[in-house]
Every structure is written in C-alpha cells, then in structure tokens.
Image: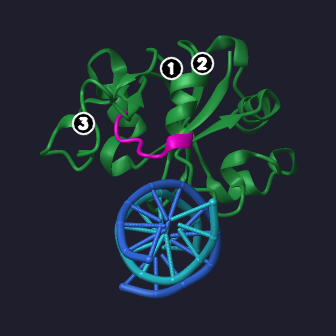
Chain colours: A green, B blue, C cyan
Amino acid sequence: MRYWLMKSEPDDCSIDDLAAMPDQTVAWYGVRNYQARNFMMHQMAVGDLVFFYHSSCPAPGIAGIARVASPAYPDATQFDAASRFFDPKSAPERPRWFNVDVRFVRKTRLIPLPELRAQPALANMRVLAPANRLSITPVDPDEWRFILTTMLELDPDEL
DNA sequence: GCCAACGTTGGC
DNA sequence: GCCAACGTTGGC
C-alpha cells in the first residue's frame, strides 16, 4: 500500500465535486507528464490512499482524502479531437496516456500550502520541493501519518 | 498577470 | 544527441 498526493484544480474538480460524482468516483484524466503517468501505470494499486490537493486557486493545499479505485487504463480524452487533452500522436492501438479512477474517502479541513511548508517533519515532502510541478507525487508513510494524526487529528486506521 | 522552473519539441 | 525555443505549471 502506497500513499500519494494528487493535484486538482478546484475549478475543474474540487473535493466537493468528487463527493458529488456518481459512485463518488472520477477518472483522473488529463495527465500529460510521463513521470506522473508512470506513477499511475506502474506504482499505484487499487486501495492506495491519496491526499486530494487543490492547486492553481486562491488557497492551494490539501482538501481531502481519496483512494485509488481502478488500475490504470487508457485515458479516453487523448483520442477525443474536441478535448483540450487530445493528443494527435496517440492512437487507440498504442495509447500514450493512462489514468486511474479515484474515489472519495472524506473531506478534511483545508491545510494551506504555507502550513505544510512550516512543518519540519515535512521538509523532504516531494510536493514541497522547490518548483515542483508534478501533479502526482508519492507521499512517504511517515509524512502521511504525520499529516493525518498531527495536522488533521484523524485516526489513520479509520479511513 | 507575472515569472521561474522545467519538460518537450524539433532543427541541426 | 545537443540545445535553443517554446509551452505549461502553479504560486504569488
């Protein structure tokens, strides 16, 4: 079991939007970065836990918790000429881009980015690295536990 | 809207 | 395979 942080622009899909989806599940389409894609293809497993992070918005930060709900499968938007994620170099018989499905677990209080940065225990957290732009980053088990128990005052065993 | 960082593209 | 140009990300 691994832990992840996945960025979403709340204008596209916020934690509340995820909670309102049918089955509270959404396809994590639109990733067009090989490193992030490879995480989904090769390292994610159904059941992995995810911090749902709001990015490119007035108050960026962790907004909730989700779970990986499917294996990686070809991202449908790469074949859709009307989509902003269309990739003319991709073809159904050799897809370039994959996504997993992600299911809502719970909303949390918003932990703003500056509050994350202020924690010495999170000094090495991947998403906080200078100029990090990866939309999906691994989270160390120690970091996961620290954020859950100390910052959110939640019991990791009750998710 | 600015801008720094960084991944990707494409000419050579 | 190098590297300059360009596009994107994302915090501020």
- Going by the numbered disc 2, the residue's amino acid type is Asp
Q: Earlier in the sequence, mark 2 or mark 1?
A: 2
The spot of residue A40 in percent (x, y) is: 52, 28
Q: CA distance from mark 2 to mark 1?
A: 5 Å
User: What residue sits right under mark 2 in the picture?
Assistant: A48
For label 2, count other residues whose C-alpha is less than 10 Å away and answer few (under 14), some (14-19) or many (20+).
some
Compared to residue C10, the image places residue A69 above or below, namely above
In the image, the segment drawn in magenta is A28-35
- Going by the numbered disc 3, the residue's amino acid type is Thr
Q: Earlier in the sequence, mark 3 or mark 1?
A: 1
Prevailing SS of the magenta stretch = loop
* Disc 2: host chain: A
Residue A77's disc number: 3
Q: Earlier in the sequence, mark 2 or mark 3?
A: 2
- Asked whether the residues under the numbered discs 2 and 1 touch, taking CB atoms below 8 Å apart as contact, a structural biologist would say yes
For label 3, count other residues whose C-alpha is less than 10 Å away and answer few (under 14), some (14-19) or many (20+).
some
